[in-house]
Image: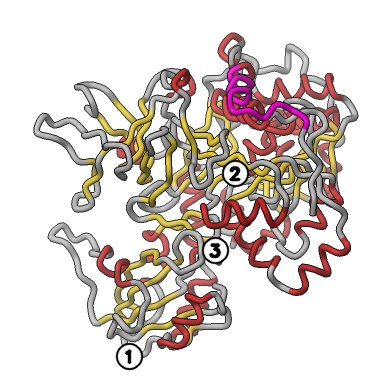
Amino acid sequence: MPALAATRDNSPSRAWLRALEMTARIEDAPARTLPVVVEELGRRFGDAPALIGRGESFSHAGLAARMNRYARWAVEEGIGKGDVVALMMPNRPDYLAAWLGLTRIGAVVALINTNLRGEGLAHAFAAARPRHLIAARELCGALDGREAKMACWWHSDAFGALLDTFSGEPLTDSEKLDVTLNDPALLIYTSGTTGFPKAAHVSHRRLMNWTHWFAGMTGAGPDDRLYNCLPMYHSVGGVVACGAALLNGGAVIVREKFSASAFWCDVAESGATIFQYIGELCRYLLAHASEASHQKEMGRAPAHRLRLAVGNGLAADVWEAFQQRFAVPRVLEFYAATEGNFSLYNAEGKVGAIGRIPPFLAHRFATAIVRFDDGTGEPARGDDGLCIAVARGEAGEAIGRIAGGSAGFEGYTDPAAGEKKILRNVFKPGDAWVRSGDLMRQDAQGFFYFVDRIGDTFRWKGENVSTTEVAQVAASAPGVTGACVYGVAVAGQSGKCGMAALEVTEDFDAAHFRAHCAARLPAYARPVFLRLVDGLSFTETFKQKKHALAREGFDPAAITDPLLADTGNGYVPLDGGLYARINSGLIRL
């Protein structure tokens, strides 16, 4: 499946210089926010495609017009600067137009995960406290009446017709509100390292820096089309991917979800030149390529035009195989967090690394790795009370120094949660750094490598899973008196999948437990393995001792407690034979 050769300069130094050039003058124009830039793009690129969906598409001029219609509609409805509007709908071109228009007039848009149900959804609304909601009609059942507490508009053909009654022309001076880089724009939910997902503040400044920096690193131009099947309620799929393609006149191919069976045909037929990935998608594509049906699919597909795959979480064992099997010329792996204040980019394409900071940018990305104490769950400190920088090759927690501009920390809607994220008196009295919650190590050449996540969050199916949230749902199931949730590694799988140690009564029913979780949790958060225990262990401060459980995993040869596994059709007893089939890949979770 040969790809067309790239003709542009993809050298690491050129990528860094492009990114610096793209972001150099952001602070010179405080009122030039991303919606203003989109309006400029509409004038500059006109009818050139911007967002390409299955049932709807926008040119650059059309996107700007749709954005302005949303802005005028919002003003008509009394939505003003600082008002929070929740947006809950699947991937589609209008998703981007909606939040651009709302933030154009100073509203703050909370991007709600469409998979949330029950208490998880209730928590998301409580964290953002929106006064207004725009939701897809098909999600009415998921909302379960919660929309009655807000001014709600169902996104439908009728709503689209209403928007069309408003002018799409640029806002006049009298219509423009005083919106600057300092103002909040979005609330994007992130699991962090503990508890329920938190709503992270994202200012207009962050939107400008994210999109412009990424456009520079990818070198996207007017002839590029970026294939985006990642959720648009996340920062990568909803902001970074779109900005990378649009800012220089390119287009985004918007797909509602990922399909391994349809992927390569769709990429080829759509003319995509860039693919935005998370590592698990690449693993799925490799696994699917080994199936007989893949050969028939590829026999019908023309050659793809991909010149670049960009994303995060691509494991070393998948990286080279993915590039070779599918003839992808270049991979740009990066590391970033929605609420974080530093990012890493592997412009050199070193397999397995998540990035490197060139010496000439060390002042801009002040990043360090400090020794971590597994016993306390906090960075270790020396006799002087300060943190200890690790040696090259040693794992520790990555942190970013808090400074002005793009290196600031904007926190969460919960101030206490934001304060917990800040590490003070790190290398000198009075300094402050943001904790990443991730363990990393750095090699002799300065490349960073991801080691593991810290605390109560693990990653499965490309999503962060909060063990606190899952444990609360599990513990509320009939027949369950206690629940401890943790992630366990499975051979050949990225991340960790969920396992729950349960204290149960005699009337516990695994099928009922599965249905209980399915009604309240996204599929990726539901426990795959169950361990039925006589009692859970706690520390002296009443925290669950989950590390020992996690270390023991789900091996029936090492565990005397009854074990169950959900292989897709319900929980069944986990014995040695099933354990071997799971770890050999014969059963895919």
Disc 1: which residue: 506
Provide the residue designation for mark 3: 522
Q: Confirm whether the magenta stretch covers residue 159.
A: no
Please indicate whether residue 199 sits to the left or right of residue 263 in the image.
left
In the rendered image, residue 8 lying in the magenta stretch gets the answer yes
Q: Distance of mark 2 from mark 1, alpha carbons? A: 47 Å
- Amino acid type of the residue tagged 3 in the rendering: Pro
- Indicate the amino acid at tag 1: Glu
Helix, strand or loop at label 2? It is: strand
Characterize the local packing of mark 1: few (<14), some (14-19) or many (20 or more) Cα atoms within 10 angstroms. few
The residue stretch that appears in magenta = 7-20
Percent x, y of residue 357 = 46, 28
Going 83% across and 40% down the picture, which residue do you hit?
A: 162
Amino acid carrying label 2: it is Gly
Q: Measured from the top left, where is residue 432 in percent x and y?
A: 30, 26
Up/down of 58 relative to 492, above or below: above
Provide the residue designation for mark 2: 311
Kind of element beneath mark 1: loop
